[in-house]
Amino acid sequence: MKESLMDIICCPMDKHDLELEVDDRNDEEVLAGTLVCTECGERYPIEDGIPNLLPPDMRD
Amino acid sequence: MSDDRSPPTDDRPHADDGRSRGSAGDDRSRKRTTAESFGRAAEAYFESSVHREGDDLDRIGSWCADANRALDVATGAGHTAGAIAAAGVPTVVAADISPEMIDTAATAYDGVLGVVADAERLPFADDSFDAVACRIAAHHFPDPEAFVAEVARVLSPGGVFAFEDNVVPEDERLATFLNGIERLRDPTHVRHRSVSRWRGWFADAGLSVRESSVANLPIEYEPWVERTSVPPDRRRELEARFAGAPDAAVDLFEIETDADGVRSFSIPKALIEATAEE
């Protein structure tokens, strides 16, 4: 996930901003980490460089 | 704008088109009238001419070409996102409910940014995009009204919504026929909606239609049922539905049969360009 995406992504539930927690990255993008909603605290994973922003009721 | 333009189903006078009618009586004539008036209404309804096969992707690309940042909802393998990037849009975000699809799309089209997301609850801030596209996917969405409202929310004022999907005629019986066969072929099929339903949802969300057209998407029957591995019992039911199709459905969906059964038919699809309120 390119960090520039942080400008536009938000929590799908309450549309509040997300905070980025990085576990692994390279020069270009975040490869693994978590996006945390600053309002409701819901956590969204970044896996293989792709953010999964499905609402929690739609994730596995 | 008035969206109350559904085709008449009564005995409105119409020109003789030379096709068989007399012996079949009023009922048959009425069904034909329904099909023909849908065709006429559709023509009158839509400003532009019918688009050619394959044109749609170019058209969507050109509608989105002036955007700085575009979103493709339910991107699938990423064809539409790729076409928008190829049209010169610097930032293209591709969203899909399936992580595998997003992986495919982001790998196939360099520079396309993938996000796993639900079309009805988009994870993007208000006014994030100057163009949003959604191509032949919305019939999978259970709540299209929520989807359209989300598109309007993430579009900046004056932004473009490029939309394409299969649609049903306004006539209830013909709509039920098409959705019925789609569901037999693919039980995950939700529903094709009519153009007037879509236009109503667009209007409610503050999206005004700038251009729209309908075209028939031709379907070869055998590959179509093979793609979803339709089991034998449902295949028999499908073939029975086609064999018993009302005349108006045979006309409108261009159902072609031979001794072996159904050979081909067509599904109408709408291509619509709308803009968000300034």
Image: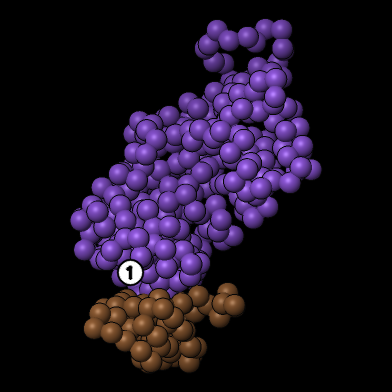
Quarter location, residue B204: bottom left
- Residue B228 percent coordinates (x, y): 63, 48
Q: Give the residue at x 39% y 58%.
A: B78
User: Looking at the image, which residue is at 23% across and 52% down?
Assistant: B87
Image side of residue B21 versus residue A54, left or right: right
> Front-most of B58 and B15?
B58
Q: Is residue B51 above or below residue B27?
A: below
Instruction: Give above or below for A15 relative to B101.
Output: below
Q: The purple chain is which one?
A: B
Q: Which of B132 and B116 is in front in this view?
A: B116
Q: What residue type is labelled 1?
A: Leu
Q: Colour of chain A?
A: brown
Q: Mark 1 points at which residue?
A: B113
Decide if residue A18 is on the left or right side of residue B264: left
Q: Which of B23 and B179 lies nearest the eye of the viewer?
A: B179
Residue at the (36%, 66%) spot, across then down: B106
